[in-house]
Amino acid sequence: MSKVDTSSHGLARRLGLFDATMLVMGGIIGSGIFVTPAEVAHHVTTPLLIVGVWVLGGIIALFASFVYAELAARRPEVGGQYAYLRDAFGPMPAFLYGWALLLVIQSGGMAAVAITFARYLSDLVQLPLGDNAVAVGVLAILTLINCLGVRSGSNVQSGLMVLKILAIGALVFVGLLFAPAAAAHVHQPSAVSGSTLVAIGAAMTPVMFSYGGWQTSSFVAGEMRNPQRDLTRGLLFGVAGVVLLYTAVAFVCVHALGPDGLAASKTPATDVMRLAVGTKGATFIALGIAISALGFLSQGMLTAPRVYFAMAEDGVFFSRVAQVSAKTRVPVIAIVLQGVAAAVIALSGTFGQILSYVVSVDFIFFGLTGAALFVFRRRNPDQPVFFKAPGHPFTTAIYVIACWTVVVATVANNPVNAIIGYVILAAGVPACLYWQRKKRTAAE
């Protein structure tokens, strides 16, 4: 048996390129793509726009992969995006990101996916429990699984990711071949108006939520055997694959259900399969979506705790969160913390509420992370790196602007829910000052 490299802060370097690619795809593909096409159809009502916003979101996601691939090559450290923000802008923005990740972004996203898992599970099994209770139960199970080790967690996540791809491929193939095309609706052509642009902006909120997650693979850079090479390639391969899958799903949903039917559907993927091959098809896709949700939750439980681990190592979080199990070489306390936070949010809100406050906060930090690449390029113009973002500074600037445009659109569309996220974020400022003062006192 090969010797385990534990030189990375006590963590074990056990992950390779396949693991990195599966982590990227697994971090993006949860259950959002099976639900959010209906959310999109509430805002834009023509097939061209419904599919078009997914293409637009995919282009932005590809630009994001360029940015994160170069950042991964420049800063292959534990904590990923947290480390990028810390090194570019200092401890406060980095702490606020980790704070928001725990209390809003990652935990909220996992809660939303856990609730969606519960919805689809109810299509398969009649349980005497509500959606929120089922969501909490599955979060608890996956927390335990990921406490067993990074290899164990990665194997489970990769296996579930392969099943996700098969389920999505079956949905697209069967939907196109066997589902009758929805009756065409004649829409009067019109020029692009201000209201159309507002509708597109609102539709981008669920789209970008579904595309989000590529950054989580960077959290486990310290557990990759060659993070500069494997994480960089994994980001590019993984995001490109997701764009193809998502666009295909959006197309088959609008093809089979039509804009009005899609907007009215609570489970569009299930409805497509039911139209195509009847009840058996609906059961198959419900199972596939449940597996997909489990894979996303497993990936989140594997990756995000490494940020809290890095924060604790920096002295700006509870020191026990930085403890690594001698047996499994994973930060068990950080993993349990993530599971508890996601469970609390799952009990506190609906899918739509969670979606709004997660996106409104998450994309602020996406934009800041894109801006970090400008900082590193200026500070170290001659630094040799494995990969440089194609089209920089233009592609990077487009990505940053797109992120903050999504923030504005989300706030305009759901101001109350967005404010909830910002209040939680603002509460991190005094928390950061407290930890910094405590760190200085300990040093003195």
Image (cartoon, rainbow, N blue to C red):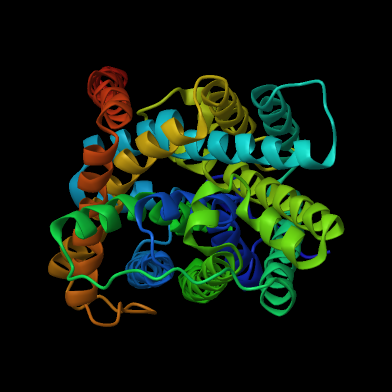
In percent of the image, x 39 and y 79: which residue is there? 386
Q: Quadrant of residue 298?
A: top right
Q: Position of residue 62 (x, y in %)?
A: 38, 72
* Up-down relation of residue 256 to residue 342 (above or below): below
Q: For the view shown, which residue lies furthest in the bottom direction?
A: 390
Identify the residue shown where x is 30% and y is 77%: 389
Q: Nearer the viewer, residue 48 or 319?
A: 48
Q: Residue at x 68, y 51 (%)?
A: 295
| Position in image of residue 292 (x %, y %) | 68, 53
Does 399 appear above or below 240? above
In percent of width and height, residue 254 lies at 53, 66
| Residue 404 horizontal/vertical position (percent) | 21, 52
**What residue appears at the point 66 percent right and 47 percent down from the top-left corner?**
293
Q: State which quadrant residue 141 falls in.
A: top right
Task: Let me know if residue 80 appears in the view.
Answer: no
In the rendered view, tell whether residue 109 sits above or below residue 402: above
Question: How many marks overall?
Answer: 0
